[in-house]
Each structure stands twice: as C-alpha cells, then as structure tokens.
Image (cartoon, rainbow, N blue to C red):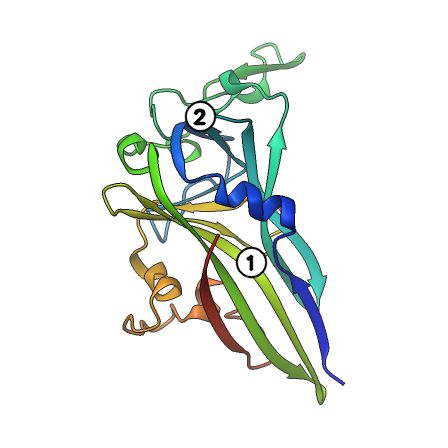
Amino acid sequence: MTRSIDLSLPAPERRRAAGLAGRWRDLLYVPGPGFSSPLDPACYASSLVIVPADGPALRVSSFVVPAFGGELCRLRLESLVDYHPERLGSFFEPGRRGLVYAMSGDRRGGEARPPADPSWCYQGPSLARRLGDVARVRVLRERVSGGSDGRPFSWIADRALALTSAAGEECLLLSRPDASEAAVLVAAPGLYRALLDETAPAVPGAARADLLGYGDWDAPLDVVVEVLAA
C-alpha cells in the first residue's frame, strides 16, 4: 500500500494566492543570517511580507513537515493583522534595510540596529517595477513518488507561486524544506526556469529534485511539476 501525503494549499490560502494579482505597495523581508545565497545571487531567503495596494498584508513562509525520512514543505500564506514595517527591509526601497537585534555596546542588553553585514539585507535594484503590478499568479505543484525498504510513497505539495508582471517579467516565491521555515524569493528564474518550463535544458546539479531540495535523498524520486492557475 502506497503511503501518501497531500500538502496542497488549503482553500483560504488558495484564495489569498489568487488575490495577489494586482498592485503591490511593497515586498518586505526580515534581515539576518542566511538571507543571501552565495550560489545564486537572485535568491533571497526570509519570512516575507507582501503589502498589496488593497487588502491586508500577507506573510509568506514555508510550512515544513517530517515524512519518509526527510522533510516536505509547502508555501504558506497568512494574513497579518499587525506587523512592524520599520523593522523590516524592503525589496522596493533597498535603502530600507530593517533592524536586527545585537548586544549593546556595554554588553548589558540588546538593541536594534541596521544590519552591518551586507549579506543580511537586499543590495540589488528596486523590484518595484517587477512586482509593483502583478498580472498573473500561478501555483507550482510538485508530484513526487519513490520508495524505501520496498515500501512505495508519494506526495503532492504546492511549493511555489510564479508571479508574472504586467511587463512579462517572472519571479518565484518558493518554499523550502528547511527548519527556519523561510520562503525564497527568486527574483529572476535563472536555473529555476526548469520548474516553470519542462522543455528547459537540463543543467547538471540543478535538476528539478535538486532545485526543490531533494537532491540528497537516498531513495530515487520521480518528480513532476505542474503549473496551475491560482
């Protein structure tokens, strides 16, 4: 008997995803260690906050569960009633780097200060043109099957949102199976285009299983990615 897990977006979160089409006022992030990727300069990992022009802000993170000897995940979209934008960095206004907490000079307590490490905050050009007007939102759903000790298993998970701007530029909001539960903003698809287009040329070390975080699993996996309307 095949063991199976369903990590598709619940209906309320699916509606929130569909509602992201339209204008955004900002995209915010929590600055700190692990924010920038040394391997892919277009990837940024954090708890993200989308500020639409209309409606409540949304927190974007990863919902992670242990299963089949590893971790699985899906994207998570939560409405925010209250948040503190002054503590967060902005992808639309890179000069706003947010605050991190560190020991005070006298070592007697903590204090909030802008991040001193450049890798802890966004240093690129403003993404307001790319994400200020989102024309289309699609869901990337993975369907994975494999087996361990002669026992088959499978799962489905809604791993990412593909965002297309009014100018046709694409970004991804991707969940990852990591203990921090951070989501990843892929500002330009690059290698991740293989998740959007099954005809994209294969790149050694960047197969779909690798991009989705399963490259080091012992069991061979069959990975299929579907691109669905939100």
Q: Residue at x 35, y 39 (%)?
A: 134
Whole-angstrom CA distance, mark 1 to mark 2, is 27 Å
Q: Does label 1 or label 2 sit earlier along the sequence? A: 2
Q: Is residue 181 visible?
A: no
Task: Pick whichever, 23 or 158, lies toward us.
Answer: 23
Q: Residue at x 34, y 73 (%)?
A: 204
Residue lying farthest right? Answer: 1
Q: Given the image, on which type of amino acid does mark 2 rest?
A: Gly
Residue on which disc 2 sits: 89
Pointer 2: residues within 10 angstroms few (<14), some, or many (20+)?
A: many
Above or below, 102 against 5 in this view is: above
In-image side of 93 versus 230 (left or right) = left
Q: Quarter of the image containing the N terminus? A: bottom right
Residue 151 at x, y percent in the picture: 72, 85
Residue 136 at x, y percent in the picture: 37, 47
Image mark for residue 158: 1
Label tally: 2
Q: Residue at x 52, y 66 (%)?
A: 142
Q: Residue at x 34, y 27 (%)?
A: 92
Observer-side mark, 1 or 2, equals 1
Name the quadrant containing residue 219: bottom right
Secondary structure at numbered mark 2: strand
Secondary structure at numbered mark 1: strand
Residue 210 at x, y percent in the picture: 46, 67
Above or below, 10 against 86 in this view is: below
Pointer 1: residues within 10 angstroms few (<14), some, or many (20+)?
A: many
Tag 1 and tag 2, C-beta contact below 8 Å: no
